[in-house]
Amino acid sequence: MATTPRQVSPREAFSLDSLDRAFDDLDRFAVAGNHDHGPFVTDYLKDLGWTMLGETPVEAPWGGLLLGVDDPRSSGLGNWRDETGLSFTEVGERLADVACDGDRISTLLVHDANLGREALDRGCVDLVIGGHTHVQSGPDPVLGSNARVGYRFTNGTTGGAAYAIAIGSKPRRDADVALVTYRDERPVGTQWVRLRTDGVFVVGPYVELALDDEE
């Protein structure tokens, strides 16, 4: 039975173009979220020069290893996409297998931080960054089974991301961004910055990440 491709709204392209312009002078990495059904978002960002992460660690601009995957609930997970019947937990376990197979991962980028839970529990990741909940949370330390400490951090929503429309003007709710500081190839601190609907910026506290020594 033939299927009709999902109709892509110009609003999606508008939002991605706006995101690209905001960070066009930086190295840019991304993963698809649980609502990014179909290939449009990943293909569009690739065409704009973004690196879409998946399955294989890459060298990060700060020198450490960066790993990330699309949310499996909508976009699949690289070669795992063709294997049906995998639960969210099973995909998280396979992601942990990749994270733990080789040098330590500096940062794991996922749409939902829960996807990085197993990698943290095994102690293979310094920092897991997610979103999904639209509520800022963390950084929270996790002691892995190998006695290595990693952190879990969830960024809040960036304003209009909470609505299924492109606003195109002022934000209708608070907009958060997360800043991560790196030193010697590892994350050493996080900080959130919030733009309120009245135009006032609120700068959150800088939180140091107390990571253990590599040896």
Image (cartoon, grey):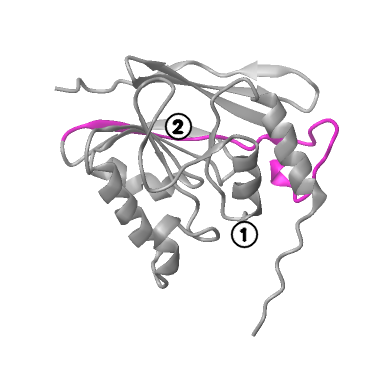
Q: Is residue 95 left or right of residue 190?
A: left
> Which amino acid is tagged 1?
His
Between 39 and 11, the residue placed more toward the observer is 39
Q: Is residue 160 visible?
A: no
- Residue at position x 69%, y 25% in the image: 22
The question of residue 44 being in magenta is answered with no
**What percent of the width, then of the height, locates residue 206?**
48, 15
Q: In the picture shown, does residue 30 fall above or below 196? A: below
x 80%, y 23%: residue = 198
Q: Residue at x 45, y 63 (%)?
A: 81
The image's mark for residue 152 is none
Kindly identify which numbered label has been placed on residue 138: 2
Residue at the farthest right position:
169
Give 36 or 49, whichever is nearer the viewer: 49
Q: Nearer the viewer, residue 162 or 180?
A: 180
Q: Is residue 120 left or right of residue 30?
A: left
Tell me: residue 89, above or below residue 201: below
Above or below, 111 against 17 in this view is below
The residue carrying pointer 2 sits among few (fewer than 14), some (14 to 19) or many (20 or more) residues within 10 Å by Cα, namely some
Q: Secondary structure at mark 1?
A: loop
What span is colored magenta in the figure? Answer: 147-173
Whether 150 is among the magenta residues is yes
- Under mark 2, the amino acid is Gly
Relative image position of residue 36 (x, y in whole percent): 62, 54
- Could you say where residue 38 lies in the image, as x and y percent from the top left? 62, 60
Quick check: 209 left or right of 162?
A: left
Provide residue 9's location: percent of width, then percent of height.
Answer: 79, 54
Question: Crowding at label 1, few (<14), some or many (≥20) Cα neighbours within 10 Å?
Answer: some
Which of labels 2 and 1 is toward the front?
A: 1
Q: Residue at x 28, y 23 (%)?
A: 211
* Residue annotated with mark 1: 37
What is the distance, in whole Å, between disc 2 and disc 1 at their CAs?
28 Å
